[in-house]
Amino acid sequence: MTTDKILRIALPSKGALAKGTMELLSACGLGVSRPNERQYFGSIPALPQVKVLFQRAADIFTKVEEGSVDLGITGYDVVSEEGQSHDDVIVIWDKLGYGKCKLVFAVPESWVDVSSIEDLAELTLLFRDKGKNLRIATKYHHLTQKWLYEKLIVHFSLVSVQGAMEAAPTMGYADMIADITSTGTTLRENRLKQIEGGTLLDSQACLIGNKRLLQESQIKLETTKVFLELIEAQMESKKYVSITANVEGKSADEIGDRLMYKSELNGISGLQGPTIAKVYSGEKNDWYAVTIVVKQNMLLPAINHLRKVGGTDLTVSTPNYVFGSKSQIYEEFLLKLN
């Protein structure tokens, strides 16, 4: 298969983001084959026209931006930091539902008088009066500077750090940090505390693409559509349950009328209404199988409604996919692309 027909996707090679990505794709029927963890390349057997490249999450934005790959899954924090001036990179899906974390300000626990962003603003002025700048260690220079400027905090300096960010205040080469945290445990273990109002960004896994490369290939667009639709339909399916019950009645229409009475008002009539089919048991009977699909939070009200109309032998299952009349995420992607 020629290069212009192959859709290249960069995925995180290790860590929590890699684990979440593999679980998501596997659940969508897009399981990734990677012979061993030291190999940089993989494949998706269900989509033979896709080639997978494993990279550090921090490097995936660059791979998409330079055109080494067409799509990439990385953290939204990376995209927000690196994507300030790269028109070729578009965010196709900003919330994939895993890898959730926050970019926050953290100060030493010993700073008992600093507990909010207002306290921090006052502290920068105290540093200025002493002829100093408050030193903030971070890997997120653009996001940190922009956020502080918007808060009218201007007296600070940013310190680049390689390695463990949390050690910077203790080691003495920074006063505080701006870094990513998911649970706050690492901050607490290093005697740092988050400050109130000091969350710069909420982040999670997101899907990005190279706008120019995708515009140039209809084949890649078609593969991208399949990729997006399967993920969207699988994620949508988590919202619903399918309930089937046996109901005795004179006819399908009569049972339908009973089911629909008042059910439309409380969301338990199903997505488009109930499906009713005759039950054949080899002898004459007036039993029908009724199936409705409802949202997860309406499970018990729907069960009770089916019972009230004579439902018995109720079974509940979860759909693997729920497809709409068209893919909403793909339609939004096309708008961004064009």
Image (cartoon, rainbow, N blue to C red):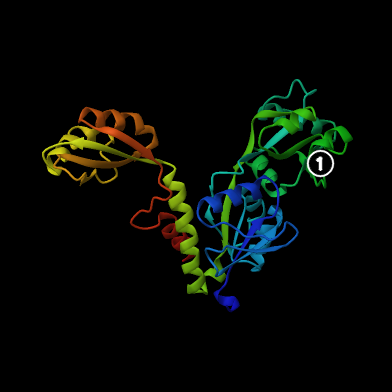
Q: Horizontal and vertical percent for residue 321?
A: 42, 51
Query: Across the whole image, how many numbered discs are drawn on residues?
Result: 1
Residue 279 seen in this snapshot = no
Q: Horizontal and vertical percent for residue 247?
A: 21, 36
- Give the position of the N terminus as an image quadrant: bottom right
Residue 79 seen in this snapshot = yes
Residue under the point 67% across and 58% down: 60
Horizontal side of 335 relative to 42 (left or right) equals: left
Dot 1 falls on a residue whose secondary structure is loop
Q: Horizontal and vertical percent for residue 21?
A: 60, 51
Name the image quarter holding residue 297: top left
Q: Residue furthest bottom?
A: 2
Residue under the point 35% across and 33% down: 299
Query: Nearest the camera: 98 or 289?
Result: 289
Horizontal side of 108 relative to 274 (left or right) equals: right
Q: Horizontal and vertical percent for residue 79?
A: 63, 53
Q: Residue furthest front?
A: 282
Name the image quarter holding residue 196: top right
Horizontal side of 293 relative to 23 (left or right) equals: left
Q: Residue furthest right?
A: 171
Which residue bears the numbered disc 1? Answer: 164
Query: Nearest the camera: 290 or 96?
Result: 290
Crowd tier of the residue under label 1, counting other residues whose Cα lies within 10 Å: few below 14, some 14–19, many 20 or above: few
Residue under the point 28% across and 36% down: 267
Q: Where is 124 relative to 91, above or below? A: above
> Which amino acid type is marked by label 1?
Ala
Residue under the point 72% across and 40% down: 179
